[in-house]
Amino acid sequence: MSDRQLGPESGTGNVVWRLYTEYADEGRRYAVLGTVATLVGRALGLLPALVIGLAVDAIFLGERAYALPFVPAGLIPAAPVGQLYFSIVLLLVATGGGAVASWVEDWGWSVFAQRVQRSLRVDAYDALQDQELAYFTRRRTGDLMSVLNNDVNALQTFLEDGLSAIVWILATVGGISVILIGLNPTLTAVALLPIPLLALFTLVFTRVVEPRYLAVREEIGDLNARLENSVSGIEVVKTQSAERFETDRVRAASDSYLRASLAAIRVRITYFPGLNLISGIGFAITFLVGGLWVLGAAPLGVAGTLTPGAFVTFVIYAQQFIWPIIRLGDVVDDYERAKTAGRRVDELLARSPTVADSATASDLTVSEGAVAFDAVTFAYGEDAVLHDIDVAVAGGTTVGVVGPTGAGKSTLLKLLPRLYDADEGTVSIDGQNVREVRLQSLRSAIGYVSQDPFLFYGTVAENIRYGTFDATDAEIEAAAERAQAGEFIRNLPDGFDTMVGERGVKLSGGQRQRLAIARTMLKDPDLLILDEATSAVDTETEALIQASLQEFAADRTTFVIAHRLSTIRNADRVLVLDDGRVVEDGTHTGLLQADELYANLWRVQVGDIQSLPKAFLERARERQSAIVRDGENN
Ligand SMILES: Nc1ncnc2c1ncn2[C@@H]1O[C@H](COP(=O)(O)OP(=O)(O)OP(=O)(O)O)[C@@H](O)[C@H]1O
């Protein structure tokens, strides 16, 4: 199915770092480019303060000679005015070079981050679609979207801004420290005093803010899910005049999000002023000590020597120390968001689907198409929906599956393509346990048409071709004809090229069903499951589709679930399900003669309500109230 490999360390270590290194491959050279540009940019950025201090001392005060590291003495003019021009040229070169380096830095880091984001999102999506169907029914679409969008974006944001900032901070702090130590080691120690305090403060911040950011991400997921659900159900909202109700629900979800955000914001906005305060006080102390030294005083008995120019350089650098610290605040904040987002993405990437190929799986080979359900029991949750089902179907048979609503008909047939796995017992095709064959081979051997088929946003032809991607236009048109869909398709504004699905032309339920039947006919599977596949078409069209379907089903094992019993009266065999059990098994005529549940369902269909036994009506009433109770409990 997917060629995505689970990282060996999934779920361990620093999640953000692990995701980045696992997904860095393609963009690594851009990260290197970004890093080099950051370092060059920083070196150029630090140059002006050095030049200004030197100019003050050498040109204006004559306290020391004009000399710069790495600059040959022969290049430096002898006269003070020449030295001033030389200094200006240096400042301009540093500014221009810094601008170029900044461009390259942003380009390198952005390309790197965007590439990682792309690969991460594709893999996260791939991991998502590999999950078993039950995973999707347990989760809300909006929340899953939030992982694929917001969480992946948060990881990218940190990569783009945060990781480059870390290099920038390290380069700035390292560069300034080296220069400061060169100028005056004692005063450097004073200037660096706030660093441990800042580290401690940051540690406390991360501990407090982390759970709050996690809560925010969960609330975003909830809110997305709420919005998605309300927008998807807009037709019901309108017909039930429930706009106020929905707005209230969205407001409630927004309120929770607001509360979670404010709780995080309260902590976050304390962090930045805290950093400023600590570093500001540190700067004031450095300024005081350095100033006193220039004036010849010895604060607290600590004496030192400093020229005014070196003091200017020192003060400028000490001031510049505040930038990386403030930037560090942003980085830590972005990192905390990325970490909580990363955990959610990683959880998805690391999750092994419960319905997957076994290690020893081989391809399914269909010869007869015989299907067997052997002592099958299944529950979605606590209560079993299918109990101990034993059914063997000979290859090529058409089997009607009928029974009251909620009897378990769809569930039974969903076990065949492994949309769900049986809890007990086995389902097999031609003697091969479906759990022991490759999913891809299993599902390509089975055609499945549901009652409410989904159309993708795309043309009619693309929707029919879906799954048989190499089909020619002629094959598509032939399949459409067989599914009695040719005529209505030709009447659409652009025929087979008409856009349908979301934002496209809206098709009726019956038209969608016919496209789905055409899609399945094109697939030409060995086994066929028609789950109320013609329930939405009018009886006349159904008769025509039935004729085609009968011909199509003639040589392949076919299961037909139908409430409209006329649909299955010609089936070779009819299984009657009630409450998760097969209660009757025979032909239409045989079952009418048996005069049990099937015969009563038939009476309902032909309008012979008077002759229904009381017990059947009682049971129907019971079933309805059970369904209502279930619905209320869910
Ligand atoms: N995804 C699901 N999660 C939990 N319960 C489910 C799920 N799908 C179906 N059920 C429950 O399982 C039972 C059997 O449902 P199923 O759809 O198989 O019945 P059915 O006989 O096909 O009904 P209908 O004729 O109404 O389509 C019902 O009680 C239903 O509520």
Image (cartoon, helix red, strand yellow):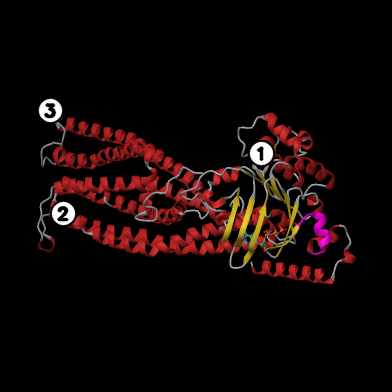
The quadrant in which residue 233 appears is: bottom right
Q: Which element type, helix, strand or loop, lies under badge 1?
A: loop
| Lateral position of residue 606 relative to residue 274, left or right | right
1 or 3: tag closer to the N-terminus:
3
Residue 594 drawn in magenta = yes
Q: What residue type is labelled 1?
A: Asp
Q: Where is residue 2 in the image (x, y as percent from the top left)?
A: 49, 44
Q: Position of residue 206 (x, y in %)?
A: 36, 61
Q: Residues within 10 Å of mark 2 (few under 14, many from 20)?
A: many
Give the main secondary structure, helix, strand or loop, of the magenta stretch: helix
| Lateral position of residue 447 relative to residue 611, left or right | left
Q: Name the residue under label 1.
A: 524
At a point 9% along the width and 57% down the height, the residue shown is 303
Residue 560 drawn in magenta = no
Q: Do the residues labelled 2 and 1 touch (CB within 8 Å)?
A: no
Q: Residues within 10 Å of mark 3 (few under 14, many from 20)?
A: few
Disc number for residue 360: none
Disc 3 to disc 2, C-alpha distance? 32 Å
| Lateral position of residue 426 relative to residue 151, left or right | right
Which residues are the magenta region? 586-596
Disc 2 to disc 1, C-alpha distance? 83 Å
Disc number for residue 74: 3
Quarter the C terminus occupies: bottom right
Q: In the rendered image, is residue 216 in sight? A: yes
Q: In the rendered image, is residue 422 in sight? A: no
* Quadrant observed for ligand 1 in the rendered image: bottom right
Disc number for residue 187: 2
